[in-house]
Amino acid sequence: MEQKNTMHEVFGEVIYSYTRAQAIEDGVLIDVTRMAQEAGFKFPVAVTASVWHEYIIPNDELVSLGQSYEGRLWDVIFMLKHYAARKQGDIVNYKLYFVMMHNGKPVEEVVELKAVCGPGDDAEPVITIMKPEED
């Protein structure tokens, strides 16, 4: 029996692909590489739209309390760097605190995130930060 060596030989023609670049262009992922580089990351970093809108972008009430997307994004990236330094592997689950509004009051809430380092569009390493249930 002949051994199949390439992805094409094993799986056949690609029917459809959705690239990371397309996901960023569509707003499914938000590129945060610039701030991640400031924190010392060498690979491109993106967050999912749900992380961006639910945790990073503060509502007007949170802004009035001094919260900013820059500060909240820095917390996401900094805590990832902290946890990643202590763990080996391509997936890092980590927790951090966010000030969130509940019933009109600010409350500190523990949020769990997941960062995955995997291949980008050209097989280069990239990092994606997401909620634990996201892929």
Image (tube, grey):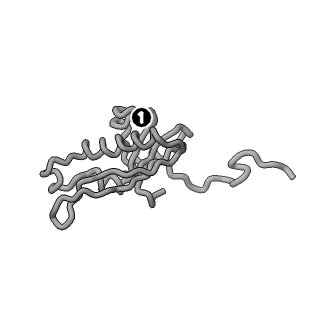
Give me the residue at 45% from left, 61% from top. Answer: 133
Residue 125, percent from left and from top: 52, 39
Left or right: 132 with respect to 99?
right
* Residue 99 drawn above or below residue 117: below
> Mark 1 sits on what residue?
41
* Residue 101 drawn above or below residue 26: below
* Residue 115 drawn above or below residue 50: above
Which quadrant would residue 134 be assigned to in this image?
A: bottom left
Three-letter amino acid code of the residue under disc 1: Phe
Give me the residue at 37% from left, 43% from top. Answer: 31
In the current view of this chain or complex, which residue is farthest to the left? Answer: 64
Give me the residue at 69% from left, 49% from top. Answer: 8
Residue 68, percent from left and from top: 21, 46
Q: Residues within 10 Å of mark 1 (few under 14, many from 20)?
A: some
In the current view of this chain or complex, which residue is farthest to the bottom? Answer: 103
Residue 84, percent from left and from top: 45, 41
